[in-house]
Image: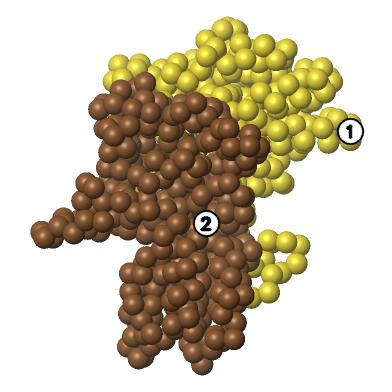
Amino acid sequence: MSDTAEKPKDIMFAQALNMAMNKAMADDPKVILLGEDIADKEGGGVFKVTAGLSGTYGTDRVRSTPISEQAIVGAAVGAALVGYKPVAEIMLMNFITVAMDQIVNHAAKLRFMSGGQTSVPLTIRTTTGAGTGLGGQHSDMLEAWLAHVPGLKVVAASNPQDAYGLLYSSIMDDNPVIFIENTPGYFVKGPAPAADHTVPLGKASIPREGTDITLIGYGSAISRCHAAADKLAEDGISCEIVDLRTIAPFDEETVLKSVAKTKAAVVVHEAVRSFGTGAEISSRIHEELFSELRAPVGRVGSGYAPVPFSPAIEKAWMFSQDDIEREVHKILG
Amino acid sequence: MASTDMVDKDVLVDIFTRADLIMQSDIKFRQMIGAGQLQIVYYPVRGQEVVSSAMMAAVNQDDYLVTIYRGLHDQLAKGIPSKELWAEFAGKMTGTCKGKGGPMHITHPATGVMVTTGIVGSGIPIANGLGLASQLEKDGKVTVCCFGDGATNIGAFHEGLNMAQIWKLPVIFLCQNNLYGEHTHMRDTTGSASIKQRGEGLGMRSVQVNGNDASAMYTAAKEAVDHARAGNGPTLIEAMTFRFHGHLLGDTSHYIPKEEMEQAKKDDPMPILRQQLLDLQISEADVAAIEAKNAAIIEEAAQFALDSDYPPGDEYRIDVLDVEIAA
Ligand SMILES: Cc1ncc(C[n+]2csc(CCOP(=O)(O)OP(=O)(O)O)c2C)c(N)n1
Ligand SMILES: [Mg+2]
């Protein structure tokens, strides 16, 4: 981490990702990018996250691909086996379903099944997130599926600085990493990272300290946690926020330390609440701190349904700041 | 490319009636979105009207359709009621899917619209299942499965066409080749010179046709339908066409060379088809009457969509499973 005296200017989340890939490509010639429409001729990515990179590093290293998710991830796995550090962009998270065999049966397992002779240092960048009226097949949060597969790391940043540091670490990591971005979050601004800013994988942060309850989340949950914490502060409730940053494997030490202090916790995510990552995190807290807790750990997530198209139902279905506040009040009584 | 004589006057009028409804609907959607009356992601279909109109003129209402996010033209050509379609696009309770599916996921079994998918290529294997059921039921139905040129690079296309071929399923695979998948020209993503070649490689009866030529398109469609109904199996139709307003509304088409776009617009199928009707001695007044009737249908549908109510918030708990999910 670097602290510069001068206040950094604000940049958008998407720009931080671009800077991280730019740095990784400059630092290591083995970093290559592949994905649909990612080169400049096709617009530099549908959200322009890879804009300019094919110009700087050439289309040998920044390759637009056919609409072939299985072939994209498979090629990334193969190149990774022999020393490349591919960054595959799967435009939207729902489209990884088409590549699940390559991810689950191969990327995640080849190191283990080869007895450690090979490794798959690939990064899959993908974006998702509801609230955009895209309906059932373009907004799912599927991180729990991936976190359940041993051998995969799963990462989700909540601000531009972390996005920069985490993406760089993901690319340089010797394991397959699924890097989950948030589509509405692309345009959110935050302080720019210093060029040498790094964030290690597997390490949570505490962006807000508090004493009464711990809110644990990642990615799109964090801004809602902050908003809820501000509101709850007016009622005299002091929230601590833990931003996991790496979902799997998650930073148990930081989570347990915080909850041991506050003695109450709510896990928050945009993904469907049932069978979500919140269940695992909550369960670990109960296993370690059961007798110290003031109340069972709460969970906030979205409803048990596909993402609805109509804005009226999408809003009712989706997790919200209100849900967090309600859950906190329920726990603290 | 197969070239053919002009089809019957009545058929051409039928195709024009469908195609004009599509064209006017597309224009109206773009207007209303531009004016902020609808806030939706919209995949324009202007330019591809004749492909689906001629295809659907060759099938019956109870034949099946599987289509994609860019499916408005297919659904309207298939005969889906405009009011319910518009209401669904607007996310209203009166829509075909109670606002839960939205523009990318239109379903209307009464007109055979069985699946609209937002996942490129995924409709193809499902179309096979509909075809398989028809084969087992001996109900004589065919399934039309629409997708784009870009979709032929997905595994599902190759797996699906092979299975349809070995089982001789009554499915018409209608590849609407508009030369672009999002921002990428087909030549940069496709190893074969045509999509037709891919079908041939899988052993399937395959044809390439100017999809913007109503007569040629209808003839190809009719042959494929007759072939399938006779139990002779599937056909891949590669219908050459173009989209005039980019991948989705707001796309500036910066990746399409100016000359290519200009030429495509010169070949706009709609004025050509209209002129063909006039050349067949259908009066200007008769053509104008068709257009006016379509305009009235659209006005009514758009107003119905605006006036309808949104579904109540907790509607999301219904239709997930066959029982309501507890709050
Ligand atoms: C599996 C999958 N990958 C990527 C996308 C994103 N996407 C939506 S449409 C599209 C282009 C499809 O092109 P084509 O098949 O030619 O159909 P067209 O849009 O031209 O009608 C892409 C890449 C998707 N929806 N599904
Ligand atoms: Mg196309």
Q: Which residue is mark 1?
A: B136
Q: Is residue B236 visible?
A: yes
Label 2, residues with CA under 10 Å away: few <14, some 14-19, many ≥20: some
Residue A40 placement (x, y as % from top left): 31, 29
The colour scheme of the drawn protein is by chain
Q: Is residue B276 left or right of residue A22?
A: right
> Chain coloured brown: which letter?
A
- Are discs 2 and 1 both within one chain? no
Residue type at tag 2: Pro
Q: Is residue A85 left or right of residue B286?
A: left
Using the image, name the chain to which the residue with label 1 belongs.
Answer: B
Q: Residue A95 falls in which quadrant of the image? A: top right
Q: Secondary structure at mark 1?
A: helix
Q: Secondary structure at mark 2?
A: loop
Which mark identifies residue A249?
2
> Chain coloured yellow: which letter?
B
Nearer to me, B164 or B207: B164
Residue type at tag 1: Leu
Q: Is residue B234 left or right of residue B93?
A: right
Residue A125 higher or lower than A158, as above or below: above
Q: CA distance from mark 2 to mark 1?
A: 49 Å
Nearer to me, B130 or B183: B183
